[in-house]
Image (cartoon, helix red, strand yellow):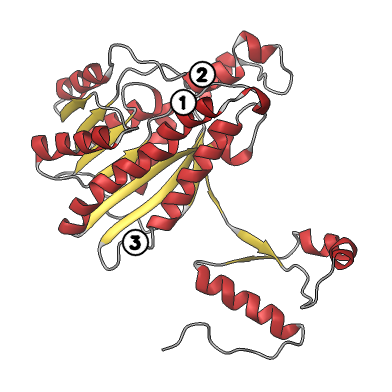
Amino acid sequence: MSEMRFDGRVAIVTGAGRGLGRAHALLLAARGAKVVVNDIGISDDGGSGASPADQVVREIVAAGGEAVASHDSVATPEGAAAIVATALDAFGRVDILINNAGICDWAPFLELDYQHFQKMRQVHYDGPWLLTQAAWPHMLKQNYGRVLFITSHVGLAGTPNAAHYGSAKWACAGLARMLSFEAGSADIKSNALGVLGYTRLLVDGFFSPEAVEDPSLAIQGERWWERNVRADQVAPVAAWLVHEKCSLNGEILDTGAGHTFRHVLATTEGYTKLDLSIEDVEQHIGEIVDGSRLNTWNNVGEALEDRLKKLHEAGVEPMGTIYAD
């Protein structure tokens, strides 16, 4: 198989100064992409400092690649516009957007005030929304684009003390799904990637002294994780999802430690009764939640058709097709 390259493509990678974002930026550049390395030098809790974006740019240039740094925040309309402008000014286009920037801290739900939640949402959901909306017109004009939303293995699977972080990560995966219906005939694909890597977020969440004191959070064997759950193992899946050969749209993949899989939205067979009562729900709850038979669908039309089929099987007169010609 020939090497999958990104020659002629321009990529924006947010949060690319460290960890997973850095790994994505380095791999794309090594395969020929011109990269905007966006990072404001943010700490895990949202504070900023000297940006490491310049260091990643130096690494890319030293290896023979092309890159420029961006120090703008993804969390404001002005910052998002400036990031896209950096790509256009430096390279004349934007083909790839990896929404990777993230922050996290850990606290029980009842200790999170609205400002705390809002800060998390602004980075993990508002930011990807704003940046994608700023890049989208340029992708439509050139009839090509690849957008990737980095969601979270923690957010998708669930864990205590992360309601603000996990729910925002779920939201950005939902945005990836919805945008897969927005491009019309243009070759623009939008997907999400759940990730698990040995990064600052993992260390602070699961290996910090506070986590070790909480049996529900603590993970043993930090050295093993550092060796075997690396950021560079995640980057190839991210890179495939933003390659021109990517065949997926509106999907959620998940990867970590070399294991990659797909998250599937599925429904059980359930129970159908037109005049449903509370008692019916109680009596048939086992049938409603039974996961031995699952159904999947690709859009709301298929979902509604499935519901009409269930009603017909329960004795309701069929309505016919949902959509008129």
Image height check: is 189 above or below 119? below
> How far is mark 2 from mark 3, CA to CA?
39 Å
| Quarter of the rendering containing residue 265 | bottom right
Disc 2 marks which residue?
A: 226
Question: Quick check: can you spot residue 205?
Answer: yes
Q: CA distance from mark 3 to mark 1?
A: 34 Å
Residue at image coords 39%, 23%: 19
Q: Which amino acid type corresponds to the residue marked 1 in the rendered image?
A: Arg
Mark 1 near mark 2, Cβ–Cβ under 8 Å? Answer: yes
Residue occupying the point 54% across, 21% down: 105
- Left or right, 255 with respect to 5, comes to right
What is the secondary structure assignment of the residue under circle 2? helix
Q: Where residue 44 sits in the image (x, y, percent)?
A: 45, 19
User: Label 1, on which residue?
Assistant: 230
Q: Which mark is residue 71?
A: none
Disc 3 designates what residue? 182
